[in-house]
Image (cartoon, rainbow, N blue to C red):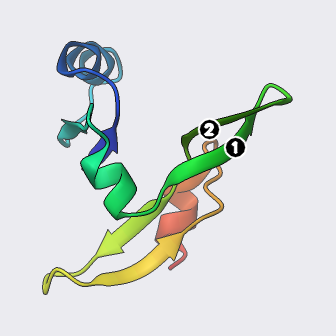
Amino acid sequence: MGVSGDAVKSHLKFATKYQLDFPLLADEEKLIIKAYDVWGPKQLFGKQMDGIVRTTFVIGADSRIEQVIAQVDTTSHAQQILKM
């Protein structure tokens, strides 16, 4: 599943546009985002700002975090996961 601070309406539009087959959670209050410690300084288009630091958590059947990918490469992220 994916989590972001965007609104539900935005998630529906994004999921439809990209034909996603997994749920997107709208965390507008940033409760999950802060619990997983992925809110902080980042750089976007050369500008420093606070925001969601894109991170992937691989969670096992026992609900424990098995892997963390902190350096997400958006162009080849599927390959990053498959190499695990």
Q: Secondary structure at mark 2?
A: strand
- Residue in the picture at 33% in, 25% down: 6
Residue beneath disc 1: 42
Pointers 1 and 2 in contact (C-beta within 8 Å)? yes
Viewer-side residue, 17 vs 28? 28
* Percent coordinates x, y for residue 62 in the rendering: 13, 87
- Would you say 50 lies left or right of 55 here? right
- Would you say 61 lies left or right of 29 here? left
Residue beneath disc 2: 50
- Residue in the picture at 27% in, 24% down: 15
* Mark toward the viewer: 1 or 2: 2
- Residue in the picture at 16% in, 80% down: 63
* Percent coordinates x, y for residue 73 in the rendering: 65, 51
* Percent coordinates x, y for residue 25 in the rendering: 20, 39
User: Gap in Å between the C-alphas at discs 1 and 2?
Assistant: 6 Å
Question: What amino acid type is highlighted by mark number 1?
Answer: Lys
Quarter of the view holding residue 10: top left
Question: What amino acid type is highlighted by mark number 2?
Answer: Asp
